[in-house]
Amino acid sequence: MDTPISTFKFQRMSWMLSLRDLFISPGEIMDEVDIQPGFRVLDYGCGKGSFTFAAAQRVGPEGKVYALDIHPQALEKVQEAGLKKGFANIETIQTSCITQVAGGSKDVVLFYYVLHWLTDPDCVLSELYRILKPNGLLSFRDPYMKEDEILRTVIERGWFRLSGKGEKTYRFTSIAREKATAPSLPELKDTTPL
C-alpha cells in the first residue's frame, strides 16, 4: 500500500486492528524484541499505534519512538492517544518510504503486517537498512506471507541477515555497510531460533 486508503477504509482497518490486538497482544509480540531503555525505534506502518505505545513504554523517557504511516489519520490517532497515555517520547512521520531521519540512527525497526501491502519493497527495505545502526534489528511479522517468501524478500538484497526466529517474529540484523553487496539466502532449516 503505497498510497493512503480512504478514511472509511482506515476506520474499518482500525477496528480490525483493535480486534487483532485482543487475540494477539502487541506486548506479547514485543516481548520477542530486545528493546532497551534509551533506544531509538521506528514503527514502520504504525496504524493506530499498537506497537508504537508498547515500544514507547519500553524505551522510556530517555528513548524515542518514531511512528511512521502513509495515512494522516493514523498519525493523528497516534498523537492523540500518545498524549492521553502520557507519552512524550513519540514523534510521527508521514511518508510511504523516505523517512528524512538520519542514517544509522535507529536501534530497532518494527516492520509488522506491512510488507505484503507494498508495491515497491525495495524502496522501503533500502530505507530501513539506511536508517538502522550497523547490526541494528529489523523485527518482522507478516502472517500473510509464507516463510520462504519472507526470507527471499528481506534477505536477497544483501542488506539483512536472519539472526533469529521467535514464535511470533523474525529477527533480521542489518549487515555492515561494506559487506552489504553480497546477498545470500539461507536454507529454511536455518530459521530456527538462534
Image: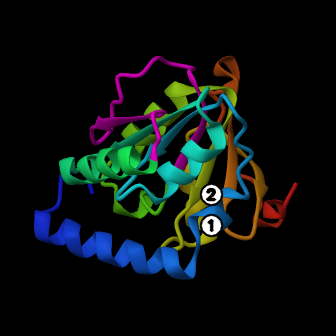
The quadrant of the rendering that contains the N terminus is: bottom left
Query: Which residue is painted at 30% across and 54% down in the image?
Result: 119
Q: Contact (CB < 8 A) between labels 2 and 1?
A: yes
Task: Characterize the magenta stretch by its predominant secondary structure.
Answer: loop
Name the side, left or right, on which 118 lies relative to 146.
Answer: left
Instruction: Identify the amino acid type marked 2.
Output: Leu
Instruction: Identify the amino acid type marked 1.
Output: Asp
Query: Which residue is painted at 34% across and 49% down in the image?
Result: 78
Residue 110 showing in the rendered view: yes
Name the side, left or right, on which 67 lies relative to 103.
Answer: left
The outermost residue toward the right is: 194
The residue segment tinted magenta is 86-110
Residue 83 location (% of width, % of height): 37, 44
Query: Which residue is painted at 62% across and 66% down in the image?
Result: 148
Question: Which of the numbered marks, if any, corresponds to residue 189?
Answer: none
Residue 139, compared with residue 16, is above or below; it is above
Residue 114, compared with residue 177, is above or below; it is below
Label 2: element kind: helix
Q: Name the residue under label 1.
A: 148
Neighbor class of circle 2 (other Cα within 10 Å; few <14, some 14-19, many 20+) is many
Question: Which of the numbered marks, if any, corresponds to residue 151?
Answer: 2
